[in-house]
Structures are given as structure tokens and as C-alpha cells.
């Protein structure tokens, strides 16, 4: 790769997904706590339920402006999110 080539957009894609999900969660959590299953918000954030699940685990450890908690498991993980 030469110095004039721009970096691959694939490297930026995970951040875009995380940013998109985090913005969605912030908006929903503004009204108080929210509970959801990944499969029910997948279309809203244009991600697969599997991608959302992986990002939620990451956000539960790294997000400082959101409280993210694995709430329960009944046929799929239910997540609880609220503003920190």
C-alpha cells in the first residue's frame, strides 16, 4: 500500500456500526430505561441481531454515557439500557 492510498473503509465499518447503535440507544434511553431484544431493533439500526449482540457486549464494558446490562434470556437475550 502506498502512502497516497486511502485506508480501507472496512476498517472504519465496525466503528460506524457501533456509533450507529450507540446513537440509537442514547435516543431511546433519553425517555428512561429501555428493554429490547436484538432481533426487534435490527431493522431500525440496519444491523443483524448477531452484530447487535456482539456490540452490546462491547458497549456494556466501554460505554460511559450508557448503562448497558444483560437483563434476561428467554429465546434471546434481553438488554436493559439507560442513560448513565
Image (cartoon, rainbow, N blue to C red):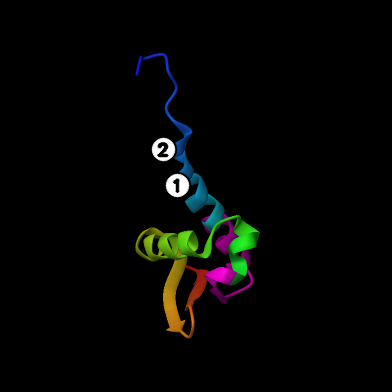
Residue 14, disc: 1
Image location (x, y in percent) of residue 71 = 44, 81
3 in magenta? no
| Left or right: where 45 falls relative to 60 | right
Q: Residue at x 64, y 71 (%)?
A: 31
Image location (x, y in percent) of residue 42 = 59, 63
Could you say which quadrant of the image residue 28 lies in? bottom right
Image location (x, y in percent) of residue 75 = 49, 82
Which range of residues does the magenta coloring cover? 22-39
Helix, strand or loop for disc 1: helix
Work out whether residue 17 or residue 84 is closer to the camera in this orientation and state it: 17
Image location (x, y in percent) of residue 73 = 44, 83
The residue under label 2 is 11
Q: Residue at x 38, y 60 (%)?
A: 58
28 in magenta? yes
Q: Quadrant of the N terminus?
A: top left
Amino acid at each position: 500500500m502506498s502512502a497516497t492510498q486511502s485506508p480501507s473503509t472496512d476498517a472504519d465499518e465496525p466503528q460506524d456500526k457501533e456509533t450507529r447503535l450507540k446513537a440509537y440507544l442514547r435516543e431511546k434511553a433519553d425517555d428512561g430505561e429501555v428493554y429490547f431484544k436484538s432481533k426487534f431493533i435490527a431493522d431500525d439500526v440496519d444491523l443483524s441481531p448477531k452484530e447487535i449482540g456482539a456490540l452490546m457486549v462491547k458497549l456494556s464494558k466501554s460505554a460511559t454515557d450508557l448503562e448497558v446490562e444483560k437483563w434476561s434470556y428467554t429465546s434471546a437475550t434481553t438488554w436493559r439500557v439507560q442513560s448513565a
